[in-house]
Image: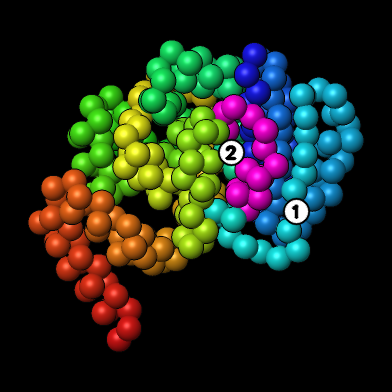
Amino acid sequence: MKLVSVIVFTYRSAETIIETLDSIRDQTYPNIELIITDDCSPDDTVAVVQDWIAQNQGVLTAVRLVTSDHNTGLPANINRGLKVAEGVYYKGIAGDDRMTEDAVEQYVRFCEEHPGVFPIARVQLFNDNDPNAVYKDIQAYCDRCYEFAQKDYREQYRLLLIQNRIVAPSATFYPMDFVRSVGGYDECYRWFEDYPMNLKAMHAGYRFGLLDRQLVWYRMSDRSVTASSMAKLKKTEMKLFFKRKFWYMCQNGMGWEAVKQCRSWVKVAFGRTM
């Protein structure tokens, strides 16, 4: 049974982290290394995690807590966990989300049956404060992600170069060999980690496939990175375009699309400097 490293990345996660950790403890897959990596949370996240570890000794193959004395951003936080990870596969999850009990088992089975294809599972959106909340725009984005996962490699790569189409919690399951080969997450993009990594995957020849089961519960709240940091995310995406996407597009025969996006980003940059 291959070892899976589940890395939980936390920041101000004291109120939600127990749900995340319990969902990993309760997995049906028997060989899990749990790594919690905290990005210098100003709340009680680390203390809560330490207490949970003390109460759950021996329930998983291994448990590690990695901390930082200063805030470094999401990619660097995950990379600290990857540095100590020993698994054959890597599953990442935020400290405010949770997984179904069979999630890791299903992810591993998919990867074993579909070598060279990275799984995209379905997610369930939820809000603790409003169980009846409906997120039409985000659900539509998720549905487009599932449609994307069923296309062939060439079309997936073309679509992903135009814009991000992958819901991060659903897709963060990679063979560790791939993660090591690309040097982990790119720390120059402080405000997101998934889009640059998935572009690297497709540029290297991997594709994505639909794992047609709901495996992740994705918490919606005003504190989530997506909800609270749109301006910073936009600036980071612009940086990604000029540093990597423009050249990927040109190499993929999408020169005119690259020029069009370049013009759009220049306008954004110019507008921000006024």
What residue is shown at x 28% (from left), y 24% (from top)? Answer: 150
Q: Is residue 83 magenta?
A: yes
What is the span of residues highlighted in magenta in the rendered image? 77-90
Residue 81, picture quadrant: top right
Q: Quadrant of the N terminus?
A: top right
Query: Can I make out residue 21 in this image?
Result: yes
Question: Which secondary structure lies at badge 1?
Answer: loop
On the image, numbered disc 2 is attached to which residue? 93
- Residue 17 percent across, percent down from the top left: 71, 41
- Colour mapping: rainbow
- Residue 147 percent across, percent down from the top left: 28, 29
- Mark 2 residue type: Ile
- Residue 16 percent across, percent down from the top left: 69, 42
- Mark 1 residue type: Thr
| Other residues around mark 1 within 10 Å, as few (<14) / some (14–19) / many (≥20) | some
In the picture, measured across the screen, residue 88 lies left or right of residue 117, that is: right
Q: Which mark is residue 50?
A: none
Q: Nearer the viewer, mark 2 or mark 1?
A: 1
- Residue 229 percent across, percent down from the top left: 48, 62
Q: Nearest the camera: 20 or 39?
A: 39
The tag earlier along the polypeptide, 2 or 1, is: 1
Q: Is residue 158 above or below residue 244?
A: above
Q: Is residue 65 above or below residue 247?
A: above
What residue is shown at x 71% (from left), y 33% (from top)? Answer: 34
What residue is shown at x 59% (from left), y 56% (from top)? Answer: 76
On the image, numbered disc 1 is attached to which residue? 67
Q: Is residue 48 above or below residue 206?
A: below
Q: Quadrant of the C terminus?
A: bottom left
Q: Are marks 2 and 1 in contact (CB under 8 Å)?
A: no
Q: Nearest the camera: 231 or 79?
A: 79
